[in-house]
Image (cartoon, rainbow, N blue to C red):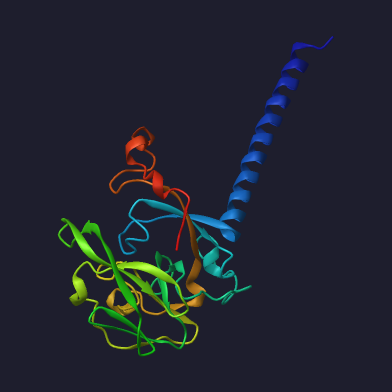
Amino acid sequence: MSSPIQLDEKKAKAQDGGVVETIKVVVQALLIALVVRTFFFQPFNIPSGSLIPTLLIGDYLFVSKYSYGFSKHSAPFSPNLFPGRIWGSEPKRGDIAVFKLPSDGSTDYIKRVIGLPGDKVQMVQGRLLINGEVVPREPVQKIRTRDAFGREVDVPTYKETLPGGVSHLIIERDGDTGYYDNTKPFDVPAGHYFMMGDNRDNSTDSRVAANDGGVGPVPFENFVGRAEVIFFSVEEGDAAWQFWKWPWSVRWSRLFQPVR
């Protein structure tokens, strides 16, 4: 017959074993999450309107980490494990990609790939020129958004077709005379990409030099991944965690929509 002391010891060992098992499960779950985040998919949310109408403030999307291979920026906190990229696959014109801001190497930005290495990119009176050729666009139904003063307005909207055949919508909030609608020609350096927002008059992108607070050309090493699908979306000004508002705040029609 076991003594009270022996029973207490068995109970203590069982409790210790339960704690150890719990710690193992938590560690394994964290490792799995780290592997998925580093090598496969990472969630991002859209905090600004620079890609309206393609992406809206309040969209949550998955970015595929493997699409462009892996660099130090694939892992959390960008540890300097190796230079350049491994298993790299170059971005295609028209991709929407997340990258680290070249000026600090840490801030996440999301824009569309417009210019490839060796291209010449310019804006002239609101029209995009790539290698001296005007990129075709055709007007479509206007989209309602907010102007620079926060007022809701209907803005000119176009279907733009990039070289290679990728078509997407852009808006010209300020018409064809916005601040970024006339630029010098930009030569895209080797190993770099020219990134722009679809909201052409409200996007700080490669049209603005990095030393002027912009993006400038983005090195291939800085790419994090390609935007793939919107998995959640709430109205601007609402928080995703406010589940009691979901019946009214969730943009149900945007859920599981591919990002193009």
* Residue 175 position in % (x across, y down): 19, 72
Which residue is at the far top?
1
Residue at x 35%, y 51% (from the top left corner): 58
Using residue 140 as the reference point, say whether residue 101 is left or right of it.
right
Q: 157 and 203: which one is in front?
A: 157
* Residue 152 position in % (x across, y down): 18, 55
Q: Is residue 12 above or below residue 42?
A: above
* Residue 255 position in % (x across, y down): 44, 48
Q: 218 and 34: which one is in front?
A: 218
* Residue 18 position in % (x across, y down): 68, 30
How many numbered discs? 0
Residue at x 33%, y 54% (from the top left corner): 57
Where the N terminus falls, by quadrant? top right
Residue at x 75%, y 21% (from the top left corner): 10
Using residue 17 as the reference point, say whether residue 104 is left or right of it.
left
Q: Quadrant of residue 3?
A: top right
Q: 191 and 62: which one is in front?
A: 62
